[in-house]
Amino acid sequence: MTLLDSSPAMLDKARQRLQRLPAEVQRRVTLLQADGENADEAVGGQRFAAVLCHGVLGYLEQPGPLVDQLCRCAAPGGVVSIMTGNPKAAAVRPALERRWDDALASFDAKQGMGVLGLPGRDYTVEEVSELIQSRGVRPLDWYGVWLFVDWLDFSGAELDPTDAKQVEATAAVELEASRRDPYRHLSRVFHLVGRKGPA
């Protein structure tokens, strides 16, 4: 596995977490510092069975160059996995926080606040699907991410991460909602999965 990030701080965190894993796992992981827009060069032209980009696209003004690199780095038949903010649900969070003016403005906004608390841009499932398809990756399906768990903050309920039965039940409900309409459309984030065509 190769983990590429432009941030030395994020790579340091990854390194610290990696050190908690068995040595045999550590040996299979390579950490690289580079911008995603230069991924192909950074990995020396290596191709991968799966290329993941989660929580990055929304912070880019122009996603095309990064998406180009993601699709290029996938091997023929490989998977491209992208997670990013869902603009169709942008009004949910401000409404649940009773920020009514923000909620009203969110219905047609393309800019929003990302999960890191930084301003970002939301791209629709259709927009990202078109980006990957134009680069030889066929969209397979998309899923909603963080629906009910995301809303628990507003209900006053808390998940106990040590309660295995509760965590398992929560995961089952989230999984079911992630692939069903209308629920997946209300998720704060969507997960798009595509497969690269043959060489």
Image (tube, rainbow, N blue to C red):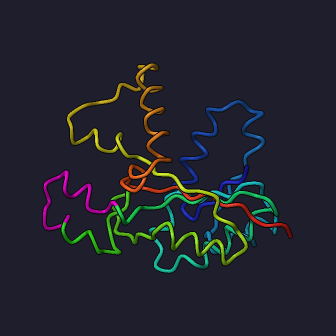
Please state the extent of the stretch shown in magenta in the rendering: 89-103
What kind of secondary structure does the magenta stretch mostly adopt? Answer: helix
Residue at the right extreme, as displayed: 199
Residue 170, x across and y down, in percent: 42, 31
Determine whether, in the image, residue 106 is placed left or right of residue 127: left
Total numbered labels: 0
Name the foreground residue: 106 vs 42: 106
Q: In the rendered view, tell whether residue 71 sits above or below residue 182.
A: below
Percent across and percent down for residue 43 are 76, 64
Q: Is residue 164 left or right of residue 36?
A: left
- Rendered-image quadrant of the C terminus: bottom right
Q: Is residue 78 left or right of residue 165?
A: right
In this view of the protein, can residue 80 be seen by the observer?
Answer: yes
The quarter of the picture where residue 185 lies is bottom left
Quarter assignment of residue 109:
bottom left
> Between residues 65 and 149, which one lies in front from this camera angle?
149
Residue 132: image quadrant is bottom right
Q: Is residue 174 above or below residue 126?
A: above
- 144 sits to left or right of 8: left
Q: Position of residue 158 (x, y in %)?
A: 28, 30
Residue 8 can be seen, yes or no: no
Q: Is residue 62 above or below residue 185?
A: below
Q: Residue at x 68, y 58 (%)?
A: 51
